[in-house]
Image (tube, rainbow, N blue to C red):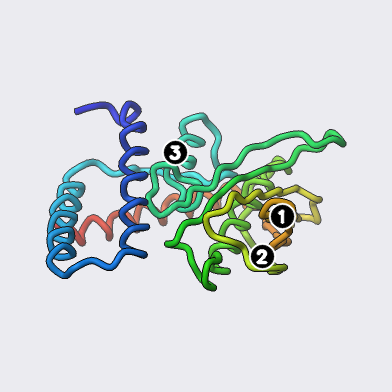
Amino acid sequence: MTPPEETSPQKERLARALRGLIEGLTMVELPADILANLATEIERQSATLHGFPTRTARKTFGQASSADDRRSFREHSPLTGICSPIAPPLSLRTETDQDGRQRVVGEVRFGWAYEGPPGHVHGGYVAAIFDELLGFAQTLSGKTGMTGKLTTRFRSPTPLHTPLTLVGTFDRMDGRCIQTTGKLYAGDQLTADAQGLFVQLEPAHLDSLDEARVEVMRRAKSKYR
């Protein structure tokens, strides 16, 4: 068997193929016999996956302490994951602005699978990418936090099939509260902005999340036995 660290390019390729399938299923009207054949084949392929080992850990932006942690999050996040077929995916990076402050910049393009208002992105996905953007931005505080409050303001509809840019900043610490701000643009048009409050977590709390994930994995495995 090929070692997991060598499978990422093929996992990325598979994720792209599945995104194309999702996009087509969303928009294309297919005859019943073709749908039945596709469903049978996908069910067969899906069943083969359950005989392979599962990932035992998944770190958030704040928890990622090694290159492997960061790679795992980048590959499998439901929003930034290049190996996740449900991710748009959103690309994020840090850069320094003209005032010498670090910020997080992102790019994303939403397809038909994310449509809410006709021709535009569903507001729930707009809020979700702010949660991801600001979850990254809060790490610029040097602390680890989880979302406590996310306030999203929709300035104008966000278009589908359009390059979108996001900018996120860490603003300040108020005790255990990490304050962040984000903006979303379609070209020069501000379509939404957000304020995120993240609550700093203690190591014991992070450990309890890891333990809870192990239990969830145990229950999930039993479903396929």
Residue 182: mark: 1
Q: Earlier in the sequence, mark 2 or mark 1?
A: 2
Q: Nearer the viewer, residue 165 or 27?
A: 27
Q: Residue at x 39, y 42 (%)?
A: 83
Distance between the Cα atoms at labels 1 and 3? 24 Å
Three-letter amino acid code at the position of disc 2: Leu
Q: Position of residue 206 (x, y in %)?
A: 53, 50
Quadrant for the C terminus in the image: bottom left
Separation of residues labelled 3 and 2 (CA atoms): 25 Å
Give the residue displayed 60% in from the left and 42% down from the top: 92
Label 2 element class? strand
- SS for callout 3: helix
Left or right relative to 10: residue 115: right
Q: Does residue 24 appear in this view?
A: yes
| Residue at image point 53% right, 67% down | 119
SS at mark 1 in the image: strand
Farthest residue, direction bottom: 117
Q: Residue at x 44, y 45 (%)?
A: 58
Q: Is residue 175 left or right of residue 204?
A: right
- Which of the two marks, 1 or 3, is nearer to us in this view? 1
Amino acid type, mark 1: Gly
* Residue picked out by circle 2: 150
User: x%, y% of residue 8?
Assistant: 36, 33
Check whether the beta carbons of the residues at disc 3 and disc 2 lie within 8 A of each other: no
